[in-house]
């Protein structure tokens, strides 16, 4: 996807010259036609898997998302459902960052 930058250490998404109004049906059709939604889904899936992952030394890369993931599994959700919850939380964080024009602050 052109104009999107993702960094694992910090969540940085930069949309250049693009304004997406996802509540507008016309924009929804355009995004679906050009495959933007599937690219964003893949992007957030990869980001969620990275946030939940555990290193070879047994230490989690992001303990906040890891505990949220494990809590969802203990509530009875499957791993893929818990991963979707993480993706949704990441979408909310990125939307808030874009809306307020701030950097990612985990705490």
Image (spheres, helix red, strand yellow):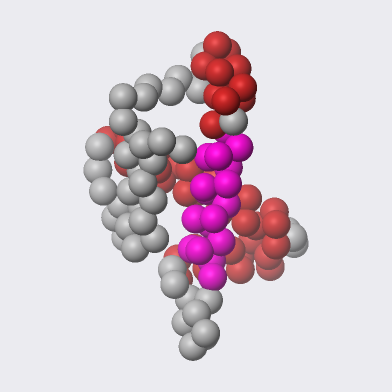
Query: How many numbered marks does the figure carry?
Result: 0
Q: Main secondary structure of the magenta part?
A: helix
Left or right, residue 100 beside residue 38: left
Instruction: From this view, report whether residue 65 is shown above or below residue 103.
Output: below
- Residue 99, x across and y down, in percent: 32, 32
User: Is residue 85 in sight in this rendering?
Assistant: no
Q: Looking at the image, which residue sits at the far left?
A: 102
Task: Give the answer, above or below, for where 76 lies relative to 24.
Answer: below
- In the picture, the quarter occupied by the C terminus is bottom left
Q: Which residues are magenta?
A: 37-53
Q: Residue at x 70, y 62 (%)?
A: 79
Whether residue 41 is situated above or below residue 36 in the rendered picture: below
Residue 2 in the image, given as x and y percentages of width and height: 41, 36
Is any part of residue 104 visible from this angle? Answer: yes
Give coordinates of residue 102: x percent, y percent.
24, 43
- Asked whether 17 or 87 is in front, the reply is 17
Left or right: 77, with 57 as reference point: right
Instruction: From the viewer's perspective, tell me whether residue 38 is left or right of residue 95.
Output: right
For image coordinates 48% across by 76% down, the residue present is 60
Does 86 sit left or right of 10 as displayed? right
Quick one: which residue is furthest to the top in this view?
Answer: 26
* Magenta stretch: includes residue 52: yes
Q: Which quarter of the figure has residue 98?
A: top left
Answer whether residue 84 is magenta in the image: no
Residue at left offset 58%, top offset 46%:
42
Instruction: Please identify the quarter of the rendering in which residue 34 is found.
Output: top right
Residue furthest to the bottom: 57
Residue ID at (29%, 55%): 105
Instruction: Report the front residue among 13 and 86.
Output: 13
């Amino acid at each position: 996807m052109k104009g999107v930058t993702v960094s694992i250490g910090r969540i940085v998404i930069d949309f250049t010259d693009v304004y997406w109004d996802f509540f507008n049906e016309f924009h929804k059709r355009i995004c679906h036609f050009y495959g933007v939604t599937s690219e964003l889904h893949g992007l957030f899936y990869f980001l969620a898997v990275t946030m939940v992952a555990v290193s070879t030394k047994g230490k989690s890369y992001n303990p906040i998302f890891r505990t949220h993931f494990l809590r969802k599994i203990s509530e009875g959700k499957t791993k893929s459902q818990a991963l979707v919850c993480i993706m949704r939380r990441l979408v909310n964080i990125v939307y808030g960052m874009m809306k307020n024009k701030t950097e990612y602050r985990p705490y």
